[in-house]
């Protein structure tokens, strides 16, 4: 009876699953800085044109427009309760990186207006370009096990526990939050804000799917 010969070494290497690559400290650091820079630039574009976004950032925008307190300060404070949830459900490393990301975004949102100004910026362009920038920034954070708190924590938890796509969860919640703004914000600006929410979450829905990116 013929015996089965073992696979050649090259074929064995091809068929064996690749080990999950873990991010280095530098990988995580550059992702946190670059991701929050992208998001903060989108925030500045939204702020300049009076637009809103979803999640805790959307709540921070509403409070900023109502009170005049800077977005960065409100955003940092409004996220504090969510760290307890993140610590219990997603671990200390995720919570620490999320805290750093929130602090960086708050800092960059205060810094950008000092070095950047717009002489003309149409709300439609701000919605699309700002939304895409924020979506790309969120994608960087999510792929390095971080978020900006609030809805991002909930979206990641549901993706890991239920298999629901983080982008779709966040899109549904964000659109609901922005829609509520019809009560307090000029309707046309809310329409542009909804366009921005779609642009942001389209990036996540297409690029952030369970199992597609497995680095830790």
Image (spheres, grey):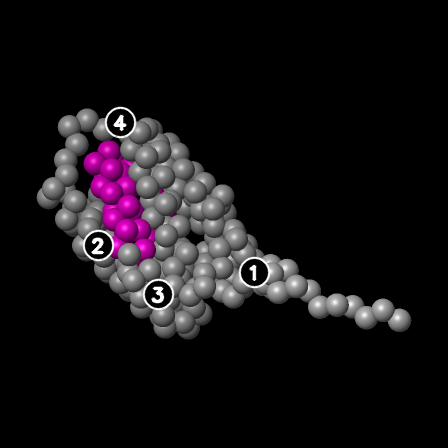
Task: Give me the C-alpha separation between circle 1 and circle 3.
Answer: 28 Å
Q: Tell me the crowding category of disc 1: few under 14, some 14 to 19, or many 20 or more residues within 10 angstroms, Cα based.
A: few
Q: Which residue is mark 2?
A: 106
Of callouts 1 and 4, the N-terminal one:
4
Q: Which residue is mark 1?
A: 162
Span highlighted in magenta in the image:
31-57
Q: Pick out the residue farthest to the right.
A: 1
The label nearer to you, 1 versus 3, is 3
Instruction: Give the quadrant of the N terminus.
Output: bottom right
Residue at 39% x, 50% y: name it.
139
Residue 40: x and y in percent read 25, 47
Q: Which residue is mark 4?
A: 122
Q: Tell me the crowding category of disc 4: few under 14, some 14 to 19, or many 20 or more residues within 10 angstroms, Cα based.
A: few
- Magenta segment main secondary structure: helix
Q: Secondary structure at mark 3?
A: loop
Residue 51: x and y in percent read 29, 37
Using the image as rendered, state which of residue 3 and residue 134 is in the foreground: 3
């Amino acid at each position: 009876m013929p015996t089965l010969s073992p696979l050649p070494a090259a074929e064995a290497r091809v068929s064996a699953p690749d080990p999950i690559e873990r991010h280095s400290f530098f990988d995580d650091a550059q992702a946190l800085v670059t991701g929050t820079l992208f998001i903060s630039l989108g925030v500045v574009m939204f702020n300049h044109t009076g637009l809103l976004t979803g999640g805790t950032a959307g709540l921070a925008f509403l409070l900023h427009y109502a009170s005049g307190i800077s977005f960065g300060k409100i955003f940092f404070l409004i996220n504090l309760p969510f760290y307890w949830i993140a610590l219990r459900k997603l671990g200390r490393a995720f919570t620490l990186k999320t805290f750093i990301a929130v602090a960086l975004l708050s800092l960059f949102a205060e810094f950008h207006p000092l070095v950047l100004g717009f002489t003309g910026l149409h709300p439609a362009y701000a919605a699309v370009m700002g939304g895409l920038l924020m979506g790309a920034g969120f994608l960087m954070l999510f792929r390095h096990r971080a978020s900006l708190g609030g809805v991002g924590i909930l979206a990641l938890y549901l993706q890991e526990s239920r298999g629901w796509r983080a982008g779709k969860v966040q899109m549904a919640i964000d659109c609901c939050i922005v829609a509520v703004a019809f009560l307090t914000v000029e309707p046309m600006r809310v329409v542009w804000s909804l366009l921005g929410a779609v642009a942001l979450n389209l990036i996540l829905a297409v690029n952030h799917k369970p199992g597609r990116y497995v680095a830790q």
